Image: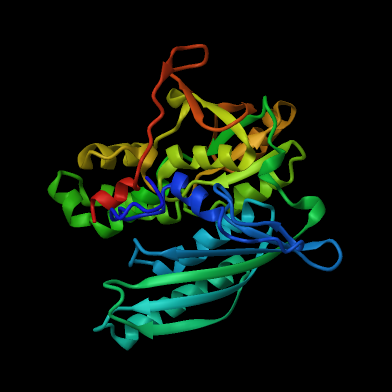
Amino acid sequence: MSLDDSRPLPAGKLPNELLDRFLKVLDCSDPSVLVGPRVGEDVAVVSLAGEDTLVLKSDPITFATDAIGYYAMVVNANDLATCGARPRWMLATLLFPPGTTPSRVRQVMVELQQAAYQFGVSLCGGHTEITDAVTRPVVVGQLAGTVSRSRFIDKRKMRAGDQILLTKGAAVEGTALIAREFAQKLLELGMRQDEVDQCRGFLTDPGISILREARIAAGCKEVRALHDVTEGGLATALRELGAAGGHRLRVYPDRIPVLGPTARICKLLELNPLGLIGSGSLLIACGSEGCRGLCDALSEAGIPVARIGEVLEEGSGVEALEREGGRPVPWPAFQTDEITRLY
C-alpha cells in the first residue's frame, strides 16, 4: 500500500508494514530515549538520573465493555513487565457514549481502582468525558514504571539459537472476550451455559495477566526477550518479536498449545486461534542453557509453558515447519484480528 493510497484501512491495529514506514518520519533524537517508536516494541524507555530508567506505555481498550477497567490496567501492565519494569503510575482517559449513566462511569472507575490495588499501581489522574465520538466505552491507559538499566530486558539482545517459549496457550484473552461479548451467540451455536461461564472465567483463570511469568523469566540470566501476545494473536506477535529483535524465527505449529474451550469457540465461530487477540500468553526468547531451568520454574509456579520454536539468523519473518525437521508450512498473516469479524 502506497503512502498516497486513499483506500480506507480496516478496523484494528495499523498493519506492521505501514506502521514501519510511517514511524520513519518521526524524529526521536533525544539522547535520553533508550527505546523509541519501532515495530514490535510496546513501550518507550527513557533514561533517568542514576541507574533507573522510566518505562512508558499507552494502550486503549476498544473491544471489551465488560470488566473494561480491569482489562485496561492489565494490558498496559503486561507490556511494562516484558522489559522487566515494575508498573507504578497510571493515567486513564475514559470516553463514554451519550446515554451513559453515572453509575456506569462510577463502575469503570471502581474497576480501575480495584485493579490498581491488585497490581500495586497508583491511579493518579486522567480525563473522563461523554462524547458521540464513541459508540461504546473506551478506556485509554497510560502507565509508567521503572527498572534499573542492569535489569532492563532489551529484545535487541536476542541471539541465533535462543529457544522460543510460550506460556499458557493461544488466544486466552480472545476466549474470555468472546464469551463475555457474544454469550448468546455461543449458546445458539450449541455451547452449554457452564462452558460459556468457563470461557468467561479465562479473564482470571488462566488469566490475561502475564506479570507472574514475566517476573519469573526476568530472574533468568539467559532470558533475552519477552513479548506479550495481544491484538493480531500469536501469528502477529511472533512477527513483532522477530522485528524488534532483528532476527528470523522458526516455529513449530504442532507444539502451540490451544486450550480446549478456545478450540471449541474458534471451531463454532470459524475463527483461527493464531489470529485471535491473546493477552495472557507470554513469548520468551531464552538461551538454551537456561531454558530447562526456566521451564521448571514456570511449571513449579503453576504456569504451563511450551517450547514452540527457536531464533534463527539476523533478518525478519517467521518460518514454520509442520514439526521439527519436517517440511515447511505456511505461517498465517492476519490483516485484522479475528475478533473484529464478530463486531
Q: Image quarter for residue 103?
A: bottom left
Vertical relation: 65 (above or below) 292: below
Q: Which residue is painted at 51% across and 48% down in the image? A: 20
Viewer-proximal residue, 141 or 107? Answer: 141
Number of numbered markers? 0
Q: Which residue is painted at 35% across and 47% down in the image? A: 337
Vertical relation: 129 (above or below) 150: below
Viewer-proximal residue, 284 or 127? Answer: 127
Q: Position of residue 190 (x, y in %)?
A: 15, 43
Q: Image quarter for residue 282?
A: top right
Left or right for 38, reference 146 = left
Q: Is residue 253 visible?
A: yes
Q: Please identify the quadrant where the C terminus is shown.
A: bottom left
Task: In the displayed orientation, state which residue is furthest to the right.
Answer: 50
Q: Position of residue 119 (x, y in %)?
A: 59, 65
Q: Which residue is painted at 68% across and 30% down in the image? A: 291
Vertical relation: 75 (above or below) 167: below
Task: In the displayed orientation, state which residue is furthest to the front.
Answer: 4
Q: Position of residue 211 (x, y in %)?
A: 60, 54
Q: Position of residue 303 (x, y in %)?
A: 56, 42
